[in-house]
Amino acid sequence: RCEKFTDLALHHSIIGTSTRVRLLLYTRHNDSCGTLLSHTNLIEHPQFNLSKPTTFIVHGFRPTGSPPAWLEDLTKWLLARADINVVIVDWNKGAANLNYLKAVKTISLTALCNFSKNSVSGSWCISKLDSHDWSQSGSPHFRFCGS
């Protein structure tokens, strides 16, 4: 099943949403069709290859609730240049709000710890040298545990 980035309507940005974080895996074998990953056990998915480096892409504040226009292009660009795991951290439910300060408030370190890079590097020994973070806009507030 293809999982796509959460696409919200403008009214979601007006009324706000509760935070929901999804991890979407893309590889060279599925560069336009995301696989939903578990927050607690990334390696339970056969498409997630532990022997390859992993890049996390974290979008920022989404005032209209729409997916970032650059996200698909960046994912395909990364995969064209290297055979890696690309994990998109989709927190559009939470980031979508006309009020930037309210969106920032929805970011909870506790929620992040549930699926942090420790899910990869702590239990399954991927070094920080084998993982990279790309972040945009409000996502500097969105830190992975152990970073």
Image: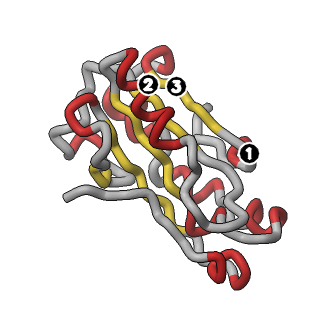
Residue drawn at (62%, 31%), measured in percent from left and top? 147
Q: Which residue position holds label 1? A: 137
- Per the model, the C-alpha gap separating discs 3 and 2 is 11 Å
Q: Name the residue type under label 2.
A: Leu
Placement of 60 over or under 146, stated as above or below: below
Q: Secondary structure at mark 2?
A: helix
Q: Which residue position holds label 2? A: 78
**In which image quadrant can residue 13 be found?**
bottom right
Left or right side of 68 for 31: left
Residue drawn at (47%, 64%), measured in percent from left and top? 6
Placement of 53 over or under 22, stated as above or below: above
User: Can you tell which mark lies on residue 132?
Assistant: 3
Residue drawn at (53%, 50%), measured in percent from left and top? 113
Q: Secondary structure at mark 3?
A: strand
Residue drawn at (20%, 33%), measured in percent from left and top? 29
Left or right side of 94 for 77: left
Mark 3 or 2, nearer chain start: 2
Q: Position of residue 108 (x, y in %)?
A: 65, 60
- Per the model, the C-alpha gap separating discs 1 and 2 is 20 Å
Left or right side of 10 for 43: left
